[in-house]
Amino acid sequence: MPIGVFPDIHIDCVDVQVSHGDRLLLYSDGVTECMNDRNEEFGESRLLDHLEGRNSQPLNELLGGLLDEIKAWRGSQEAVDDLSLMALEIT
């Protein structure tokens, strides 16, 4: 959801307890909705599969590897939406 675009939108706020080493990945819908040559979406399951077991990998390598995987998935298809990623790590 675009933040600040719709003035009358209600957004719920929640508190989340975080600890040293916790990570947060924010991504645009262009990541999960990226299409390949067979007209299939990259999807949340592929995103989660990529992240599985990589919690000790440095964030820049994690995000770079994810972008490489998305580009390989896309193949010759042009990106029709942005591919935005942001990761935070509690240190």
Image: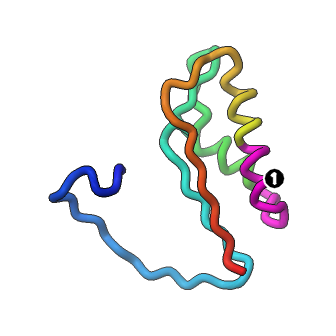
Q: Residue at x 77, y 53 (%)?
A: 62
* Residue 13 lies within the magenta run: no
Q: Is residue 61 left or right of residue 9?
A: right
Q: What is the crowding at mark 1: few (fewer than 14 residues within 10 Å), some, or many (at least 20)?
A: few
Magenta stretch bounds: 52-66
Q: Which residue is mark 1?
A: 61
Query: Please, what is the three-letter code of the amino acid marked with disc 1?
Result: Glu
| Residue 54 screen position, x and y as percent | 81, 58
| Residue 88 screen position, x and y as percent | 63, 67
Q: Residue at x 76, y 36 (%)?
A: 68
Considering every residue shown, the one lying at the far left of the view is 8
| Residue 86 screen position, x and y as percent | 60, 56
- Callout 1 secondary element: helix
Q: Is residue 10 above or below residue 62?
A: below
* Residue 62 lies within the magenta run: yes
Q: Is residue 37 left or right of residue 9?
A: right
User: Nearest the camera: 17 or 90?
Assistant: 90
| Residue 56 screen position, x and y as percent | 84, 66
Quadrant in which the C terminus is drawn: bottom right
Q: Residue at x 49, y 31 (%)?
A: 81
Residue 66: quarter of image? top right
Q: Is residue 34 above or below residue 50?
A: above
Q: Residue at x 55, y 56 (%)?
A: 26
